[in-house]
Image (cartoon, helix red, strand yellow):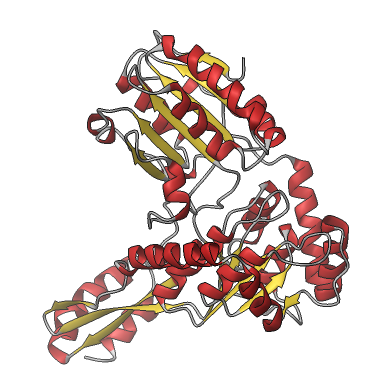
């Protein structure tokens, strides 16, 4: 069996107690990340150089990737890849352009309160490396920041063993207009962007997916720096299947997110148990041929689940508790299921809408909340790069209309200076 069976038939829709709790970073991850952050805080660029050598196997004279390297990479990438990056960038940018701010103001008696959307000055993007390259994550990080009006957008991504950043990632940085690229990965990259070093100026917001160490670094540094999209971590997918679901499509779509590597999640939920053996068979065949077989097998072994339920309503109840990063409704009649969704990062409807479309070029962002944080968080958006500032204007009539209310409330709270600031203006 590739997938672990979780049989919830007969449990109805109240199934929370029967579901595994989400993984919590163990003390080993939290302690290791805390030590890395402490090193970066104490020694800055020297720590970055040592940590890059320790974790990525290369000693760099500088973490900054110069413009000549980026230009050379753009020249080297195949023309069809560069064109695909540009098409994807246009689609992602167009989607996020709908989030451009519109002026708003509240008008009362002698009172005007304006709402100003002000972008942060500097944003830090993280694109994972190591097991694979992720130029698409560069585009996804940068597009909403660009729409928001962020002045500087930097990128940190791990170097290969030869110290280089792959050409596709650098080409994506060029297409997206990234201000500066740094060959730094892991928790040390998050620490450098949050704290600042002589080479890497601190940023205001950090975005981008990563492994458990990257997610834990964001968690520990949240508050010192803005962290968007609920600590986006290892990839997750839930596939909802019924009797109409082609077994090979369910299998390959479970693999789509699982091939990102260990610590992720791949769940099949169905009220038609007869389809599970066929999906298992397809999974076995496809995984045997996959270039990243080891990563797939690791994820399936730790978090691959076939969940059996009694009904579509029960399936959606399980999905809402799991709150997956990616939710595929791999059924022909998906509209009733959409109405039952309350927690998911992104939802893909029907047989022709695989999550891979959203991962690359559909437009909506693929940087999504993981580890059940879709209960309270959303996909990365332009608003993650903005601050909302209220500007209050009051004329004499407006002041008099509110004065007594403020005095009464301030005195009730024992805050006499608040009341006095009103009394002195009368």
The answer to whether residue 83 shows anywhere in this view is yes
* Quadrant position of residue 396: bottom left
The answer to whether residue 302 shows anywhere in this view is no
Q: What quarter of the picture does the C terminus occupy?
A: bottom left
Residue 152 location, x and y as percent?
Answer: 54, 81
Residue 60 location, x and y as percent?
Answer: 85, 72
71 left or right, relative to 278: right
On screen, 401 above or below 50?
Answer: below
**Residue furthest out toward the front:** 79
233 left or right, relative to 356: right
Q: At 44% from the left edge and 37% from the top edge, which residue is drawn? A: 323
Residue 110 location, x and y as percent?
Answer: 13, 85
* Quadrant position of residue 283: top right
On screen, 39 above or below 393?
Answer: above
Q: At 54% from the left edge and 18% from the top edge, which residue is drawn? A: 280
Residue 384 location, x and y as percent?
Answer: 44, 65
* Quadrant position of residue 326: top left
Q: At 38% from the left edge and 13% from the top edge, which residue is drawn? A: 272
Q: Nearer the viewer, residue 120 or 305?
A: 305
Q: At 40% from the left edge and 79% from the top edge, which residue is drawn? A: 118
């Amino acid at each position: 069996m590739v997938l672990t069976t979780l049989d919830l038939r007969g449990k109805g829709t109240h199934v929370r107690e029967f579901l595994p709790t989400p993984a919590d970073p163990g003390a080993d991850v939290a302690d290791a990340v805390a030590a890395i952050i402490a090193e970066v805080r104490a020694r800055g660029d020297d720590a970055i150089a040592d940590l890059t050598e320790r974790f990525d196997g290369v000693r760099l004279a500088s973490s900054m990737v110069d413009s000549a390297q980026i230009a050379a990479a753009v020249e080297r990438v195949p023309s069809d890849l560069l064109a695909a990056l540009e098409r994807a960038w246009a689609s992602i940018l167009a989607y996020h352009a709908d989030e451009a701010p519109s002026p708003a103001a509240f008008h009362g008696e002698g009172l005007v309160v304006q709402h100003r959307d002000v972008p942060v000055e500097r944003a830090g993007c993280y694109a994972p490396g190591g097991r694979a390259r992720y130029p698409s994550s560069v585009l996804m990080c940068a597009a909403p920041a660009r729409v928001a009006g962020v002045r500087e957008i930097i990128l940190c991504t791990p170097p290969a063993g030869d110290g280089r950043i792959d050409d596709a990632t650098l080409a994506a940085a060029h297409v997206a207009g990234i201000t500066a690229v740094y060959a730094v990965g892991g928790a040390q990259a998050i620490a450098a962007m949050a704290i600042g070093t002589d080479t890497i100026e601190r940023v205001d917001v950090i975005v981008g997916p990563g492994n458990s160490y990257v997610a834990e670094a964001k968690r520990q540094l949240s508050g010192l720096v803005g962290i968007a999209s609920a600590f986006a971590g290892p990839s997750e997918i839930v596939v909802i299947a019924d009797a109409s679901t082609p077994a090979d499509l369910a299998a390959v779509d479970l693999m789509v997110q699982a091939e990102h590597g260990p610590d992720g999640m791949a769940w099949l939920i169905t009220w038609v148990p007869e389809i599970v053996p066929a999906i298992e068979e397809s999974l076995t065949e496809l995984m045997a041929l996959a270039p990243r077989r080891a990563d797939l097998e690791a994820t399936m072994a730790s978090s691959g689940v076939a969940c059996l339920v009694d009904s579509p309503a029960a399936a959606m109840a399980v999905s809402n508790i799991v709150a997956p990063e990616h939710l595929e409704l791999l059924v022909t009649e998906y509209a009733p299921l959409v109405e039952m969704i309350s927690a998911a990062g992104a939802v893909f409807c029907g047989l022709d809408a695989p999550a891979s479309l959203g991962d690359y070029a559909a437009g909506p962002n693929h940087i999504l909340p993981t580890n059940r944080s879709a209960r309270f968080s959303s996909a990365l958006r332009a608003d993650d790069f903005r601050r909302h500032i209220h500007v209050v204007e009051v004329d004499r009539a407006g002041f008099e209309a509110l004065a007594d209310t403020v005095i009464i409330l301030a005195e009730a709270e024992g805050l006499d200076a608040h009341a006095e600031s009103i009394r002195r203006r009368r």
